[in-house]
Image (tube, rainbow, N blue to C red):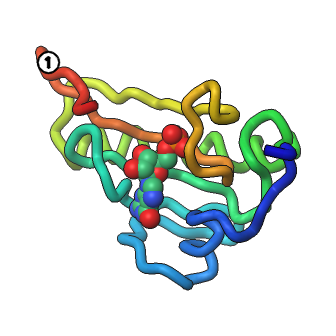
């Protein structure tokens, strides 16, 4: 990749309403929606509306607004899905496991003795 933001990515399309998603939270700066291939029941994604590929190129001011929402939704998801814990994941560039190049945090409810789906 050339490490620049491409608005044609799938989450850009979700933000613009060009493809459907199950939205669970939205404010002026942030959108959260269910992951289409959940690794655990309740797996959701939290993204800023501002364009960045990942944490590496994000404006710190965007991260400052995003992280309290990640925290709140992690607590809500844990409660709503009656989980025992929550894994928060975030990948930067393809070699690190990133497949969609719009900044996102995974919130994955976890259960005692239950492994993540691959
Ligand atoms: P990552 O880039 O952090 O590896 O993961 C991208 C995540 O986006 C994956 O968990 C994948 O299931 C999810 N995903 C990919 N395409 C779509 C889509 O069209 N809609 C939704 N809701 N999630 C998607």
Kindly state the secondary structure of the residue where label 1 is placed.
loop
Disc 1 crowd, CA 10 A, few/some/many (<14, 14-19, 20+): few
Quarter holding residue 13: bottom right
Total numbered circles: 1
In the picture as drawn, the residue positioned furthest to the front comes out as: 1
Name the one closer to the observer, 19 or 70. 19
Q: Residue at x 69, y 34 (%)?
A: 93
Quarter holding residue 21: bottom left
In the picture as drawn, the residue positioned furthest to the left comes out as: 113
x, y percentage for residue 17?
Answer: 55, 83
Location of the N terminus by quadrant is top right
Location of the C terminus by quadrant is top left
Relative horizontal placement of residue 73, taking residue 111 as reference (left or right): right
Q: Residue at x 28, y 35 (%)?
A: 109
Q: Residue at x 64, y 40 (%)?
A: 67
Q: Residue at x 75, y 36 (%)?
A: 55
Name the one closer to the observer, 102 or 81. 102
x, y percentage for residue 74?
Answer: 41, 40
- Determine if the C-beta at disc 1 is less than 8 A from ligand 1: no
In the picture as drawn, the residue positioned furthest to the top comes out as: 113
Relative horizontal placement of residue 39, taking residue 107 as reference (left or right): left
Quickly name the residue at label 1.
112
Vertical side of 40 occupied by 85: above or below: above
Vertical side of 102 occupied by 91: above or below: above
Vertical side of 28 occupied by 99: above or below: above
x, y percentage for residue 69?
Answer: 57, 48
Vertical side of 18 occupied by 110: above or below: above
x, y percentage for residue 95?
Answer: 64, 26
Relative horizontal placement of residue 79, taking residue 91 as reference (left or right): left
């Amino acid at each position: 990749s050339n490490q620049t933001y491409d608005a044609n990515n799938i989450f850009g399309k979700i933000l613009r309403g060009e493809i459907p998603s199950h939205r669970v939270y939205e404010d002026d700066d942030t959108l959260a929606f269910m992951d289409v291939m959940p690794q655990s029941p309740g797996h959701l994604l939290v993204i800023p509306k501002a364009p960045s590929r990942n944490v590496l190129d994000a404006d710190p001011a965007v991260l400052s607004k995003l992280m309290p929402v990640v925290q709140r939704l992690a607590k809500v998801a844990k409660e709503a899905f009656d989980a025992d814990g929550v894994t928060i994941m975030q990948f930067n560039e393809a070699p690190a496991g990133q497949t969609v190049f719009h900044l996102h945090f995974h919130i994955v409810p976890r259960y005692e003795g239950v492994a993540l789906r691959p």
